[in-house]
Amino acid sequence: MTADHRALRDSVRGLVAARPEPLWPRLCKEIGVAGLATDATLLECQVVLAELARQLTPSPMLGSAVLATQALLRVGATGLLPSLSAGDRVAALVLHGDRVLDAASADVLLRADGDDLFEVTGFTVRPCDLLDPTRPLAVVSHSGAPARRLGSAPGLSAWLRDLACVALSAEQVGAASRAFELTHSYVRQRVQFGRPIGSFQVIQHRLAEAYLRLETATTASWTAAEALVADSPDAPALAAMAKVHCSEALQAIVGEMVQMHGGIAITWEHDAHRYLRRAYADAQLFGAPADHLNRLAATLLPT
């Protein structure tokens, strides 16, 4: 991170910790997070996504401020950008399937179809059962609804898939970082057999492995983001790697969180089960890790 990245991180972390209601307008007006995709780069968006995910903060940052906004920028359709960048409106982007991020709160629905981007009107939205209640997904019905073509870009749908994987990996790293911190703090306080459980070698080894997973996931996410910003030919493979590795790292770290907290971790009052839900829900978002492994195999392995 640069000094500017750290300042952005600290600003977001401080505002989220203050828990103002409603939070999203404050983030947009005071920090300008909804306009980062247009005024800065994906790297700055990654910083904000990670910070919001540390506290599992529901917001339209991923769906509207990153995916929808970047889709509009990619095809050169700028008419909707001022209101989205100011946080005055929320957009949802249909990538594949019918479960769409931020659809319930969306003022605008976009659909990527091959190289083309459409604005859809007359769509209907209904809630769906969620494993992770902090992740705003809804079922969108738009078959036969009027659509206006906004523009096109070569390989748009594939590029948006890679963008979604990279942006999601930042959230996974943020959630994993917080889960690790909470676990590290707990094992230093929890006493068993007259000593903190963190003093036992087996716990230390498991924490060391979790920390290694966190560091390598952070590297995978940031490297993929840099490649996407640079429009590198390696970006699709690095995006797939970030999706796979960060999904597995978050699941493993949260698994240790639950194990080391013991019985308290499965109570409604503790946050461990919320991170566990996020880990398993995120693994399936934008394609399961196995799907991206198959994509990597087709790209990297000789036939």
Image: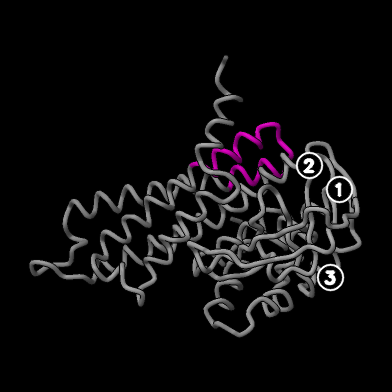
The circle on residue 75 is 1
As measured in the structure, the alpha-carbon distance from the residue carrying label 3 to the one carrying label 2 is 23 Å
Residue 137 sits in quarter? bottom right
Q: Eyeballing the image, is 195 above or below 155?
A: below
Residue 103, x across and y down, in percent:
69, 64
Q: Nearer the viewer, residue 151 or 61?
A: 151
Colour scheme in use: one colour
Q: Which residue is mark 2?
A: 156
Q: Residues within 10 Å of mark 1 (few under 14, many from 20)?
A: some
Q: Amino acid at mark 1?
A: Val
Q: In this rendered view, identify the residue nearer to me: 102 or 27.
A: 102
Left or right of 110? Residue 286 is left
Sequence-earlier tag: 3 or 2: 3
* Residue 83 - label: 3
- Circles 1 and 2, Cβ within 8 Å, touching? The answer is yes
Residue 193's place in the image compared with 167, above or below, is below
Q: Amino acid at mark 2?
A: Leu
Q: Quadrant of residue 51?
A: bottom right
Q: Position of residue 244 (x, y in %)?
A: 50, 41
Find out whether the residues at labels 3 and 1 contact each other: C-beta distance under 8 Å.
Answer: no
Above or below: residue 42 compared with residue 182:
above
Secondary structure under badge 2? helix
Look at the numbered disc 1 and give the secondary structure of its residue: helix
Identity, as a three-letter code, of the amino acid under mark 3: Ser
* 3 or 1: tag closer to the N-terminus: 1
Query: What span is colored magenta in the figure?
Result: 222-244
**x 87%, y 44%: residue:** 152
Q: Nearer the viewer, residue 152 or 6?
A: 152
Disc 3 residue crowd, few under 14, some 14–19, many 20+, Cα 10 Å = some
| Secondary structure mostly taken by the magenta-highlighted segment of the chain | helix
Tell which residue pokes out farthest to the bottom in this image: 21
Q: CA distance from mark 1 to mark 2?
A: 8 Å
